[in-house]
Image: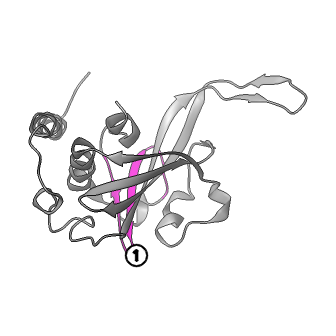
């Protein structure tokens, strides 16, 4: 397996962030002023959407109890994290949407307004750890700004994040297998 120099640098920065998480830092000292997480007031929120592609087999159980299993194929998984600032912490509402057969051309619509047909279902709530916050900040710094051709999820852009804070947003292409749920829920 080949890892690019950017990938190695990112992995090293994640390791440094994980080792530094033992030292308690206040929120504003941790956040880069260019981040959409910077300078939030009590009750403010930022929404992270991540769409990534994974190989999988879909299994469906019908109302009559029949189980239908498909063949392995690429699926897009769309996850949503609403971070709400409470004191010096973030309270997170985690949701995910139904699987979509790859490619997912609807993802770029989230930067305008979330639509009902995305069918997000709230899965869990939790307080974000300092390590989780550092992971989100690292991904925001690592991602490259999407251009018009990147907006739909295609074979060239299989991992993207949209970060929304009121009317401000960023759509970033993330190179590599960096999935927020896998990095935060370990």
Return the x and y of residue 123 as percentages of the image width and height.
Answer: 55, 44
Placement of the N terminus among the 4 image quadrants: top left
Left/right placement of residue 66 relative to residue 140 reads: right
State the image coordinates of residue 93 (x, y, percent, origin top left). Answer: 47, 52
The vertical placement of 59 against 150, above or below, is: above
* 143, above or below 168, in the image: above
Give the residue displayed 32% in from the left and 62% down from the top: 86
In this picture, which residue range is highlighted in magenta? Answer: 152-174
| Residue highlighted by disc 1 | 166
* Residue found at the very far front of the displayed protein: 87
**Location of residue 38 in the rendering, given as x and y in whole percent from the top left corner:** 21, 67
> Looking at the picture, how far across and down is residue 74, in whole percent?
55, 34
Q: Quadrant of the C terminus?
A: top left
Nearest the camera: 61 or 22? Answer: 22
Residue 114 placement: quadrant: bottom right
Left/right placement of residue 145 relative to residue 75 reads left
Residue 185 colored in magenta in the image: no
Residue lying at 61% horizontally and 25% vertically, measured from the top left: 72
Whether residue 146 is visible to the viewer of this picture, yes or no, is no
Q: Is 22 on the left-hand or right-hand side of 80?
A: left
Whether 157 is among the magenta residues is: yes
């Amino acid at each position: 397996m080949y890892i690019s120099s950017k990938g190695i640098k990112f992995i090293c920065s994640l390791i440094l962030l994980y080792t530094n998480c033992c030292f308690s830092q206040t929120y504003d000292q941790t956040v880069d002023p260019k981040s959409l997480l910077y300078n939030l007031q009590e009750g403010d929120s930022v929404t992270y959407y991540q769409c990534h592609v994974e190989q999988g087999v879909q299994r469906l159980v019908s109302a009559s109890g029949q189980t239908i299993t498909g063949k392995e194929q690429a699926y897009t998984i769309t996850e949503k994290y609403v971070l709400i600032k409470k004191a010096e912490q973030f309270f997170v509402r985690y949701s995910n949407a139904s699987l979509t057969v790859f490619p997912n051309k609807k993802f770029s619509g989230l930067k305008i307004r979330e639509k009902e047909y995305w069918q997000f279902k709230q899965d869990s709530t939790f307080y974000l750890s300092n390590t989780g916050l550092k992971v989100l900040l690292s991904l925001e710094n690592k991602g490259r700004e999407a251009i018009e051709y990147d907006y739909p999820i295609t074979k060239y852009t299989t991992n993207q994040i949209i970060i929304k804070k009121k009317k401000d947003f960023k759509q970033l292409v993330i190179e590599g297998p960096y999935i927020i749920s896998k990095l935060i829920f370990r």
